[in-house]
Amino acid sequence: MREPINRDTRLALDLALTIRHDGNGGVADDLTDPADLTAWVRAHPEALPDTAPDRADDHREGLPAGTAPQPADGGAAGFTADAAQLTAVRELRAAVRALFARAVRPGEPSAADAARLMPLPEAVRHLNEMAARTPSVPVLDWPEGAAPVLRHQPVGPGDDLTAALAHAVIAFLASPDRDRLRACHAPRCVRYFLKDHPRQEWCKPSCGNRARVARHHQRHKAPA
């Protein structure tokens, strides 16, 4: 039975999964230009916290690189990324994948990262710096007929997108879900995934099929 994945875990995973196999033996990057990031955020509206009415006209000068004004409606549908935000999110993703590689130990990291991981202390420092771009406070949401939910509400101007993603990653890595994180080592896969059951080895059935075929071929390969 597939276990549910909460908002923070899904955002953290989906950000990492913008690095993927390209289908031809290489690695593809889904965030290569601002248009890519714009499309990704619009497909993940929870990545961009709504702008509270009393913050809509906040003075935004003096913010760190990677900060851009957000749409007045505060929604992802009106979001358009710029080059600075793309750079900031890509740098955050590099830290995230380094931390994922640490989380799956003693297993091996994703093949996409094995030779180019950001040093762990640098990854931790960078993640925390990104999270600090928008200070937040914990807020309880408890809709009628639903379970209570903790969310973090920004308390001042800042880089909503990068900070929100960093907050989600921190929440995931500090949660029990982290223990389910694995790197898929099937041929031609570079994904991270959460195990749904103790015996799961691959991120999806097609990866399992490729791995079994590869193992069969290796066992029956004629000696050179």
Image (tube, grey):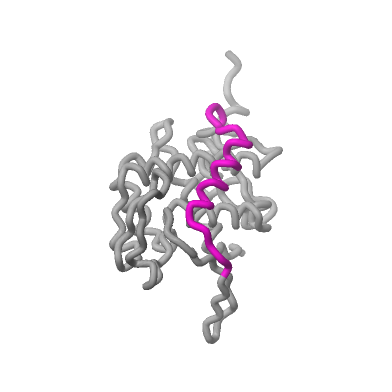
Residue at 44% of width from left, 38% of height from top? 21
Q: Residue at x 62, y 36 (%)?
A: 120
Residue 89 horizontal/vertical position (percent) = 43, 45
The image shows residue 24 at horizontal and vertical percentages of 39, 32
Q: Would residue 35 be visible to someone looking at this image? A: yes
Q: Is residue 167 above or below residue 209?
A: below
Above or below residue 17? Residue 25 is above
Q: Quadrant of the C terminus?
A: top right
Q: Relative to the observer, which residue lies in front, 219 or 60?
A: 60
Which residue lies at the image location 52% right of the left edge and 82% below the top edge?
143
- Please state which of residues 157 and 177 is positioned toward the viewer in this rendering: 157
State yes or no: residue 116 in magenta: yes
Part of the protein shown in magenta: 114-138
Count numbered badges in the picture: 0
Which of the pair 90/210 is nearer the observer? 90
Is 119 magenta? The answer is: yes
Instruction: Identify the image quadrant of residue 80.
Output: bottom left
Screen quadrant of the N terminus: bottom right
Q: Is residue 40 above or below residue 54?
A: above
Q: Residue at x 42, y 53 (%)?
A: 159
Residue 64: horizontal and vertical position, in percent? 42, 46
Asked whether the viewer can see residue 212, the reply is no
